[in-house]
Each structure stands twice: as C-alpha cells, then as structure tokens.
Amino acid sequence: MAPGTVTFVVFENFDTLDLAGPVEVFGEAGYNLRTVAPAKGPVTSDAGLSVNPDHSVRTADPHDVDTLLVVGGAGVHVAQQDKNLVRWVADAATSASRVASVCSGAFLLAEAGILDGHRVTTHWRKADRLAAEYPSLTVDCDPIFVQEGPIWTSAGVSAGMDLALAMVEDDLGPQASLAAARELNLFLRRPGSQSQFSVPLWSTPPRDDIMRRVVDAIHADPGGPHGIADLANVAGLSPRHLQRRFTQEVGMTPAAYVERVRVEAAQRDLSERDDPVETIAHRHGFGTAETLRRTFHRIVGASPTDYRARFTTTRPPTHSTPRYR
C-alpha cells in the first residue's frame, strides 16, 4: 500500500526548515503532501520565503487528515490567538491517525488541547515557556523527539527531519527510511532519546586563555591523560586552583567535562567505524567496554550496542509491523 498524506499547518513567520526538512523526507518516501494555512493566499516564513498553501482552514476538510504536522516558528504565538486555526487543528486531530509538531509548533497543538496530560518536547529555548503556559503538559527539553502513542513532538530544525524519518520507518519499515536518508545524504544516527545538547551547550565557554587551553587539550585528544594533575600541568595551576576556576567558568568539574567529551567521541566512532566496543573504550579513555557501557547509558540513555544499531535505523527495533506495505 502507498503511504498516506501528510498535512502541514503553516502560518505567517513559520520556520523555513521546520517545513522544508520534513517535506523533503516525506516527499522522498512517496507521501502525498499538502499545506493548510489560516487564510487564503501566500504565507511568508521567518527567512522571507513565500509559500502558497494548498488550502485555508475554510476550505480544508479537518476530517480528511491522516498525519497532521504543525511546524514551528516565531509566528506561532500569533497563530495561537487565531481561534479559527486552533479550532481547525483541534478538529483535524480528532480524525488524524497521528499528530505531530516540530519545534514551537507544540504551542499550537497545546492551545488546541491535543497535548494535555502528555510528555512532550520542543526546542530547549522554548521549553520553560511551554511548561508555564500549559502546566498540564510534562515538558522534557532533552530528547530530540518524543512519541506517546499517536502524538509526536520534536525539537527544532534538524530534529524535524529525525522525526519524519522515524515516522517513515513506522509506516514503511527501516529500509524505506534508510533509502530516504541516503538519498538526502542524512545519517540515521539519532534516536528520539538522544539529547538536544552537545558538550558546548552543556557548558559555558571559558572566558580566559588558560581555561580555553585546557578545554582545547581535552577536545584534541579525548582519550588522553586528563586527570586533574594532568590538566593542572596544562594550565600551569595547582590542581585545587584549576578545579575551582574550571568549575566556575565552565559550569562543571573538569572530570565531568572530560567524561562528556569522551562520550561524544565514542558516539562518533560507533556511528562511523566498525571497531569493537572494547577498542573504542580503550581509544577514548574508558579503559574497559563495561566502563564505557555504564557511562554511555547514564549520559546517552542507551547502550553502545543499541546506539550503533540505531546508526542504520531511526528507532529501536520493535515487534510491530509497519503501518503500510
């Protein structure tokens, strides 16, 4: 069976990539695509791109929706006040087989009452506002996307493509998702549980040259000797003085920073190399595969083996069958 139709909800000042990314993924996989806007006529993205939607909320049948996907963008907070648009989204959600948002599109779904009682995500910059405006939601700003039954929410920009690939896999199976990703030169390496944050976002950039020198030394050789005494020698400070200054400037201890850098280095190797986990553990300073496994699970939320498996699929293997064949 052919895949279904994805209906994208757009509005003035939507985010260009929140729409374009998923459109490319679903289009490559053979879905029918349509756009719905609050009113007839072109809408303009935050980057100045003009899009002429297929329908307005006055002409689109809200009960003829398979997958409903609301994009994000700076204009979403104006769109939240559009009662006709909110009502159309709420009506469409009652008949849609699944409902999704990219980035701040979650605000429009929340305004329509679709997310009540659910765990959801959005861009990390928007998470506090979403939680404050809609206290019935459980807002988790860490994962790149969250699925709870037929409700899917994602972080911003590239996370929308991860979400779309996961939906393609859910519908058509991993080979279809992989084929779409290969055609678009994407890596299927990010399960929904992967954090939105990389090391630079978890930390504060150091202000002075000494701390920058320490940080650069860690990144240059993640598996190198980076005990407190080693890093103190790089900085030309006493271990106690380095510990205090590094924690003040970077926002975490040197040991925690080294650990995160090593985990990210291991993630890259697991995604791009066929080396045994034991080899990767030794290369990046973990010592043993078991130490890597425990650290990886604590920080990434998955084992190294599971993470490697997800390099070729967007989601963990399940026993469910694809929605379409």
Image (cartoon, helix red, strand yellow):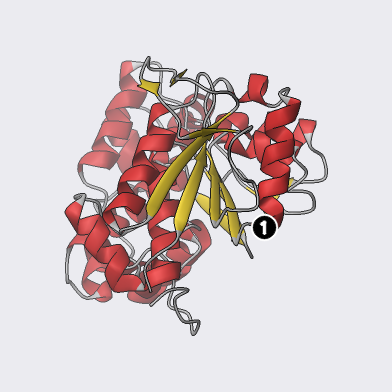
Instruction: Report how many numbered discs are placed on residues in the image.
Output: 1
Residue at left offset 78%, top offset 44%: 113
Q: Judge left or right: residue 257 versus residue 146.
A: left
- Is residue 2 among the parts visible in the rendering? yes
* Label 1: which secondary element: helix
Q: Please state the horizontal and vertical placement of residue 219, each as a whole percent of the image.
A: 26, 40
The foreground one among 10 and 303 is: 10
Q: Give the residue drawn at x 53%, y 35%.
A: 36
Query: From this viewpoint, is residue 228 visible?
Result: no
Q: Amino acid at mark 1?
A: Ser
The vertical placement of 269 against 137, above or below, is: below
Q: Which residue is mark 1?
A: 95
Q: Residue at x 73, y 54 (%)?
A: 118
Quarter of the image containing the N terminus?
A: bottom left
Tell me the residue at 78%/32% (across/down). Answer: 132
**Left or right: where does residue 256 sit relative to residue 57?**
left
Q: Is residue 88 left or right of residue 210?
A: right
Of all residues, the one furthest to the right in this rendering is 136
Which quadrant of the view contains residue 34? top left
Residue 215 x %, y %: 32, 33
Front-lying residue, 238 or 155: 155
Position of the C terminus by quadrant:
bottom left
Q: Quadrant of residue 87?
A: top right
Question: Which residue appears farthest toward the front when viewing the image?
Answer: 59
131 or 153: nearer the viewer = 153
Q: Position of residue 110 (x, y in %)?
A: 72, 40
- Where is residue 291 shown, x and y percent of the image? 41, 70
